[in-house]
Image: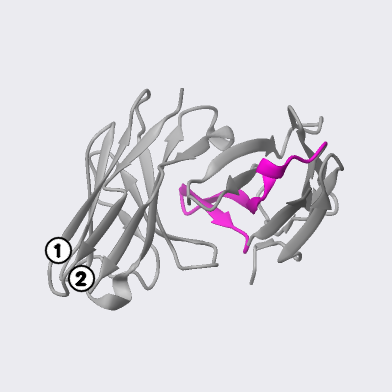
């Protein structure tokens, strides 16, 4: 149980185009999903917290107009990188919380999406 | 200020031996959770073990155990009987409540290399 999928796993796009990344919880309903960004050899940086049916909460320094997040259902959240530029190239990972007692919720991660902007 | 500190950027361990990966944390919350994740070269984040702040017993999951010392604010991961497949990055993380919501904060990671 607690499987999270992410699609696509790898994407290469031209500068100026938009890229959509999907995150799905396959065997559970996730009220909260998280989007992270990871640069090579670095830790995960939380970009935003996505709650189903409401606007995402973005971390300081993350442009909400650049990284559009939609949490349309309890099993799907999408991240759209708009007008992508080479500096947006990174590893994007989503996670979903498996509901439990408040402080015990464990998050499970998708396999990640490697984005390369040319 | 760094909330999760992993002071070992890299560690080596001989196959079949035990290894301890250090993690210290900083929080003023009473309720929080501590997690360890493994990230192999493929990039996926694999959940290993969880420790709740109110849990009195140290968490164990197979070959993984968490040495939780609340007063010292440390949550070290112990891997027993290391295997070659344990070579990966290991991240310590803390879940804490912030302004009515919660978030997970990750340490900088420790790269573990198991030697044959």
- B96 displayed left or right of A87: right
- Tell me if residue B109 comes above or below residue A117 in the rendering: above
The reply to whether discs 1 and 2 touch (Cβ–Cβ < 8 Å) is yes
**A84, A114: nearer the viewer:** A114
Residue A13 image-quadrant placement:
bottom left
Q: Secondary structure at mark 1?
A: loop
Q: Going by the picture, which residue comes out furthest to the front?
A: B116
- In the image, residue B95 lies at what x, y percent? 57, 47
User: Which residue lies at the image location 48% right of the left edge and 46% below the top edge?
Assistant: B44
Query: What span is in magenta?
Result: B81-108
Q: Which mark is residue A60?
A: none
User: Mainly helix, strand or loop, the magenta region?
Assistant: strand
Sort mark 1 into few (<14), some (14-19) or many (20+) by Cα contacts within 10 Å.
Answer: some
- In the image, residue B73 lies at what x, y percent? 79, 53
- A9 displayed left or right of B49: left
Which chain does tag 2 point to?
A
- In the image, residue A82 lies at what x, y percent? 17, 66
Of mark 1 and mark 2, the one earlier in the sequence is 1
Q: CA distance from mark 1 to mark 2?
A: 6 Å
Position of the C terminus of chain A by quadrant: bottom left
- B23 displayed left or right of A76: right
**A56, B64: nearer the viewer:** B64
The residue where tag 1 is placed is: A18
User: Which residue lies at the image location 37% right of the left edge and 43% below the top edge?
Assistant: A33
- Tell me if residue B109 comes above or below residue A111 in the rendering: below
Sort mark 2 into few (<14), some (14-19) or many (20+) by Cα contacts within 10 Å.
Answer: many
The residue where tag 2 is placed is: A84
Which chain does tag 1 point to?
A
- In the image, residue B115 lies at what x, y percent? 78, 52
């Amino acid at each position: 149980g607690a499987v999270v999928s992410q699609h696509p796993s790898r994407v290469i796009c031209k500068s100026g185009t938009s890229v959509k990344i999907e995150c799905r919880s396959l065997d559970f309903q996730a009220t909260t999903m998280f989007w992270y960004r990871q640069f090579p050899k670095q830790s995960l940086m939380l970009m935003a917290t996505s709650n189903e049916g409401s606007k995402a909460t973005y971390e300081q320094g993350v442009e909400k107009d650049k990284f559009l997040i939609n949490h349309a259902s309890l099993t799907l959240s999408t991240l759209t990188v708009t007008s992508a530029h080479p500096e947006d190239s990174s590893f994007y990972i989503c996670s979903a919380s498996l509901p439990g007692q408040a402080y015990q919720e464990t998050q499970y991660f998708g396999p990640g999406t490697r984005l390369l902007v040319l | 200020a760094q909330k999760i500190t992993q002071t070992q950027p890299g560690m080596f361990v001989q196959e079949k031996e035990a290894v301890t990966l250090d993690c210290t944390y900083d929080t003023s919350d009473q309720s929080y959770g501590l997690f360890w994740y493994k990230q192999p070269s493929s990039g996926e984040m694999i959940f290993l073990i969880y420790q709740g702040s109110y849990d009195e017993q140290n968490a164990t999951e197979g070959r993984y155990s968490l040495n939780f010392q609340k007063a010292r604010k440390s949550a070290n991961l112990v891997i027993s009987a290391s295997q070659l497949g344990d070579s990966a990055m290991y991240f310590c993380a803390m879940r804490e409540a912030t302004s009515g919501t919660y978030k997970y904060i990750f340490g900088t990671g420790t790269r573990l290399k198991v030697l044959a």
